[in-house]
Image (cartoon, rainbow, N blue to C red):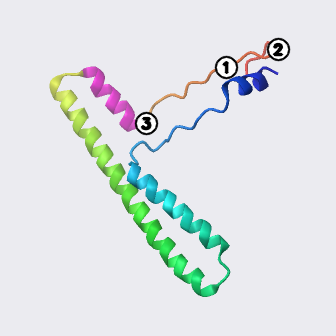
Amino acid sequence: MHKILLKKLLGKKEKKANEEWITGNTWKLIEERKKIKHTLESIKSERQLQQNKEKYRKADRNVKRNVRKNKRDFYETLAAETQRAAEKGEIRTFFQAIKQISGNERKRELNVKEDNKVLS
């Protein structure tokens, strides 16, 4: 009962993008690739299908290339920031960057007691 009430009051939790290194331009390319794939699924003609498959292949290659470049740039920037923090002796910034690079962030969960006193 409480879960239903909480969902009504709070609504659905928005998803946070896991890939923080992906830039806005790359997200636009991903959306464009999705549109091409959607049109690809609705085409009946064989000739148009081949043309759109080639268009999708190019868009897919472009997206993958941009994502790799974004990720490389992101981690190079993070490594430079870590190096600068280590040289200046900023321990907190240094270890935060190390933690972000290693990916050892804990997932925090919020437990809610239900009517029968059980955590869920």
**Category of crowding for the residue at label 1, using alpha-carbon neighbours closer than 10 angstroms: few (below 14), some (14–19), many (at least 20):** few
Residue type at mark 2 is: Asp
Image quadrant in which the C terminus is located: top right
Q: Which residues are magenta?
A: 91-102
Q: Which residue in the protein does label 3 denote?
A: 103
Quadrant hosting residue 1: top right
Residue type at mark 3 is: Gly
Q: Main secondary structure of the magenta part?
A: helix
Question: Residue shown at 45%/55% (left/top)?
Answer: 28
**Category of crowding for the residue at label 3, using alpha-carbon neighbours closer than 10 angstroms: few (below 14), some (14–19), many (at least 20):** few
Residue type at mark 1 is: Asn
Estimate the spatial distance between the alpha carbons at disc 3 and disc 1, rounded to whole Å.
Answer: 24 Å
> Residue 106: where, in percent of width, then height?
51, 28
Question: Residue shown at 78%/17% (left/top)?
Answer: 114
Tell whether 98 sits left or right of 5: left
**Residue 9 — which label?**
none
> Residue 17: where, in percent of width, then height?
50, 41
- 55 or 20, which lies in front? 55
Q: Nearer the viewer, mark 3 or mark 2?
A: 2
- 87 or 34, which lies in front? 34
Q: Secondary structure at mark 2?
A: loop
